[in-house]
Image (cartoon, rainbow, N blue to C red):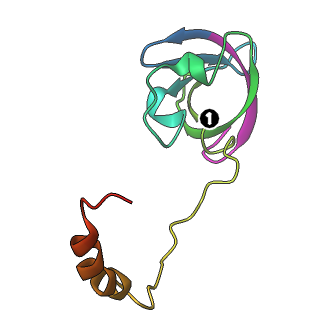
């Protein structure tokens, strides 16, 4: 196995820092907590459970058969890209309405 390969692995153990994975009978790996999701991960068990069989991407393979794996690279759905919003009016409507809002502030309707 080499970097970039997609493999199926079974979660065998979960620790606060990551999830241990069995890929083959002789190949073990670790999904570090930082490779579970792009956002903050408080508890890995919110994403993975012991016994789950999941797709993982190989980040690094050592000579002794240990793998560094990523869950988030294979299991993301609909990640939104940043969007640029161009305001046509800016705060003009606010400036136009401000005097009226201040004048009516505190009046009962």
Image vertical order of residue 79 relative to residue 37, above or below: below
- Relative to residue 41, is residue 93 drawn left or right? left
- Relative to residue 96, is residue 70 drawn left or right? right
Image vertical order of residue 81 relative to residue 64, above or below: below
Residue visible at 64% across and 20% down in the picture: 48
How far across and down, in percent of the image, does residue 8 sit?
77, 29
Image vertical order of residue 80 relative to residue 93, above or below: above
Residue visible at 31% across and 87% down in the picture: 96
Choose between 44 and 20: the one closer to the eye.
44
How far across and down, in percent of the image, does residue 107 sit?
28, 61
Looking at the rendered image, the quarter that the C terminus falls into is: bottom left
Image-quadrant location for residue 88: bottom left
Q: Is residue 108 magenta?
A: no
Q: Which residue is mark 1?
A: 71
Image-quadrant location for residue 105: bottom left
How far across and down, in percent of the image, does residue 56 sit?
68, 35
Q: Is residue 3 magenta?
A: yes
Residue visible at 62% across and 35% down in the picture: 71
Stretch of the chain drawn in magenta: 1-12
- Relative to residue 3, is residue 100 drawn left or right? left
Looking at the rendered image, the quarter that the N terminus falls into is: top right
Residue visible at 73% across and 24% down in the picture: 9
- Relative to residue 106, is residue 78 drawn left or right? right
Tag count: 1
Q: Secondary structure at mark 1?
A: loop
Residue furthest out toward the bottom: 88
Report crowding for label 1: few under 14, some 14 to 19, many 20 or more residues within 10 A (C-alpha). Answer: many
Choose between 8 and 28: the one closer to the eye.
8
Choose between 29 and 61: the one closer to the eye.
29
Image vertical order of residue 103 relative to residue 26, above or below: below
């Amino acid at each position: 196995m080499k970097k970039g390969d997609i493999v199926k692995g079974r979660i065998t153990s979960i620790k606060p820092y990551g999830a241990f994975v069995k890929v083959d009978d002789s190949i073990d790996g670790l999904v570090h907590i930082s490779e579970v999701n792009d956002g903050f991960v408080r508890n890995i068990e919110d994403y993975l459970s012991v016994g789950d069989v999941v797709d993982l991407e190989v980040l690094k393979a050592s000579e002794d058969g240990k793998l560094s794996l990523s869950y988030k690279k294979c299991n993301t759905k609909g990640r939104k890209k940043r969007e640029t919003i161009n305001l046509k009016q800016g705060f003009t409507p606010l400036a136009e309405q401000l005097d009226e809002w201040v004048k009516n502030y505190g009046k009962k309707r």
